[in-house]
Amino acid sequence: MTRPTPRTRGEELLLARVSAAAGRAHLGKRRATYPGAAHTRPARARWLPATKATADVRLDLYEQGMTIAVKGRIHVVRYDTTTVRHDTACTVTDIEGKQVVLYVRPEEPEASGAEVWVTEIRRAVARAQLPRALAALDNGERLTFGDIWLTRERIGSGDVSARWPQVRQLDITKGVIRLNIDGNWHNLGPTESEIPNFSVFHAVVDCLRADGARP
């Protein structure tokens, strides 16, 4: 049986800092740790596709959020407040408003578990933010996801609008978001990568479609 490689002094200190940051943010229990690569953007930077990572990163997933250790700094992300975008990279917003762009390490895409952590982040954000989104709709508010808007009664974007009982299916084809309204397909305009928190949007649509289908 192979023994695990002992941590170095630097790794022990980093783990202590990560754990302390997660504790201060009340992220709960650690669930998994992954390697990767990342760079950061200022809080007010535009959302632009990233092309090159600048540093190795340690990514720790917790019950209520995650920590990202990059360039000696620990970024804390809460699932209930972050914004996620996913194109060629996964971009999240930390609790200070700074954007962190996460990549797969090109030399070890399988070992990094990127598909696992990207999927888990998106699912966790949807779980955390869906109740608040539905509550806002119940209060008569209108939600926007990029150029798409939602109310309890309707969904729309640009010239396309429909009541929920008319919506038969939501489909993403080559990144393009399409809606089947009364048997006819309509493009909603923005692509999946242009929608902030697409997983939350998709979860809200599923709930509203189900409610609209009830007699």
Image: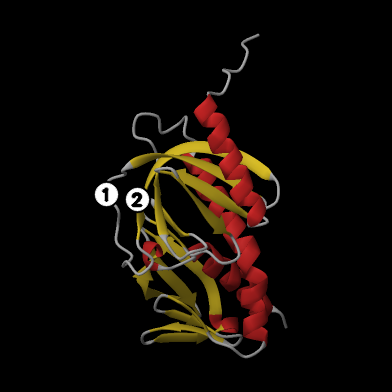
Tell me where residue 160 sits by quadrant: bottom left
Dot label at residue 51: 1
Q: Position of residue 203 (x, y in %)?
A: 59, 66
C-alpha gap between disc 2 and disc 1: 8 Å
Q: Which residue is nearer to you in this view: 153 or 38?
A: 38
Label 2 secondary element = loop
Residue drawn at 65 percent across, 74 percent down: 132
Q: Position of residue 183 (x, y in %)?
A: 48, 76
Quick one: quadrant of the N terminus?
top right
Tell me where residue 206 sits by quadrant: bottom right
Residue drawn at 58 percent across, 19 percent down: 6
Dot label at residue 88: 2
Q: Amino acid at mark 2?
A: Thr
Label 1 secondary element = loop
Quick one: quadrant of the C terminus?
bottom right
- Mark 2 and mark 1 in contact? Answer it, CB < 8 Å: yes
Q: Amino acid at mark 1?
A: Thr
Residue found at the far bottom of this picture: 140
